[in-house]
Amino acid sequence: MLRSTLGFGSFVTDEADIRAADQVPELMNMERKPPTEKQFEILIRMHSDAGKGLRVYYVYEKMKKFRIKR
């Protein structure tokens, strides 16, 4: 992820990167390529490491939407 050398700026950049990463499954689906279990695993790991428990829950909900079992 890109990070700014400024204190608050790095937080904003990280949040933007996380939001962009959350959109990958939908973008893959629009390209008619189903997202893989590995891509969801990376999203879950990224949100867990960032302490974003609610985002982990939403990733699991997306996994159900795309019929990926975990």
Image: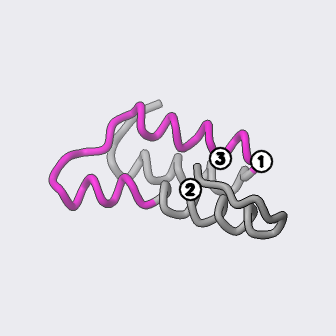
Left or right of 10: which side holds 7? right
Amino acid type of the residue that numbered disc 3 sits on in the rendered structure: His
Q: Residues within 10 Å of mark 1 (few under 14, many from 20)?
A: few
Q: Residues within 10 Å of mark 3 (few under 14, many from 20)?
A: some
Quadrant of the rendered image containing residue 18: bottom right
- Tag 1 secondary structure: loop
In this rendering, the answer to whether 61 lies above or below 40 is below
**Magenta segment includes 52:** no
- According to the picture, the residue beneath numbered tag 3 turns out to be 47
Q: Residue placed at 47% from the left, 30% from the top?
A: 70
Q: Earlier in the sequence, mark 1 or mark 2?
A: 1
Q: Nearer the viewer, residue 42 or 37?
A: 42
Amino acid type of the residue that numbered disc 1 sits on in the rendered structure: Gly
- Tag 3 secondary structure: helix
Question: Between marks 3 and 2, how big is the CA–CA gap?
Answer: 10 Å
Q: Which residues are magenta?
A: 23-51
- Which disc number belongs to residue 51? 1
Q: Nearer the viewer, residue 4 or 62?
A: 4
Q: Residues within 10 Å of mark 2 (few under 14, many from 20)?
A: few
Q: Residue placed at 84% from the left, 64% from the top?
A: 7
- The percent position of residue 30, horizontal first and vertical second, equals 21, 61
Q: Residue placed at 81% from the left, 69% from the top?
A: 8
